[in-house]
Image: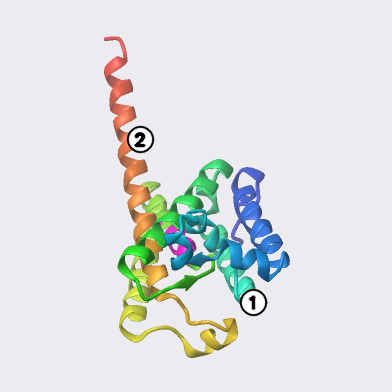
Amino acid sequence: MIVALPVKPQFSLGPIILAVTAILLFLAGTTVNDTLAYDRYALQSMETWRLITGSLMHTNGYHLLLNLAGLALLWALHGEHYQPVKYVKLFIWCSLGTSIGIYFYSPTLIWYVGLSGALHGIFVWGACMDLLKGLRSGWLLLAGITAKLVYEQYYGSSAEVASLIDAHVAVDAHLYGAISGGILFMLMWMFTVAVERLNARRKPL
């Protein structure tokens, strides 16, 4: 069976923008990384842009490649739900939710970079969109991500991955990102339902 990938520009432009941005920022060097990474102490000095930009930075090339692979996988799974503007907004809000979660609920996590937290949010949002479109595979995806998050919270991350990316894997960021994605889906769904009901009331009898 041949699986059709969502290669049309309206489905792929958002992930491409995100991937290119992450690559360019990585190539910009350590000074940019230090300026944009999530840093708890810098945030306390009102460098609030780090709440979003930290998700775009990476520790090394392996870290970047792993996250780009995850980005591509999510696009292949449910890229048909992506529209460029919506996708960029989704990434920004998932990044923000991840960073806020870290700041308030993981105070010992001082420094964080990487797409993975936001990607977990996009994964959950995409799985929920699958369900909304009548695709039962969304349940399987949600079960899989839930099992992964529970495992990480109890047993931590892979030591091999931590060695590869030259940093501890921030499993709490994965959790907060996933929660953010679920909350964003619910808010978007409720807004859509409210608009539909309002429009229905305005229709002439």
SS category of the residue bearing label 1: loop
Can you tell which of label 1 and label 2 is closer to the viewer?
A: 1
Q: CA distance from mark 1 to mark 2?
A: 40 Å
Q: Which residue is depicted at the point 60% across and 70% down?
A: 58
SS category of the residue bearing label 2: helix
Residue under numbered circle 1: 60
Of the pair 91 and 3, the residue shown nearer to us: 91
Q: Give the side of residue 5 with respect to residue 43, left or right.
A: right
From the viewer's perspective, is residue 115 above or below residue 187?
below
Q: Position of residue 57 (x, y in %)?
A: 59, 66
What amino acid is at disc 1? Asn
Q: In the rendered structure, which disc, 1 or 2, sits on the residue that comes first in sequence?
A: 1
Q: Give the side of residue 111 with respect to residue 187, left or right.
A: right
Q: Position of residue 171 (x, y in %)?
A: 40, 75
Extent of the magenta region: 117-124
Residue under numbered circle 2: 192
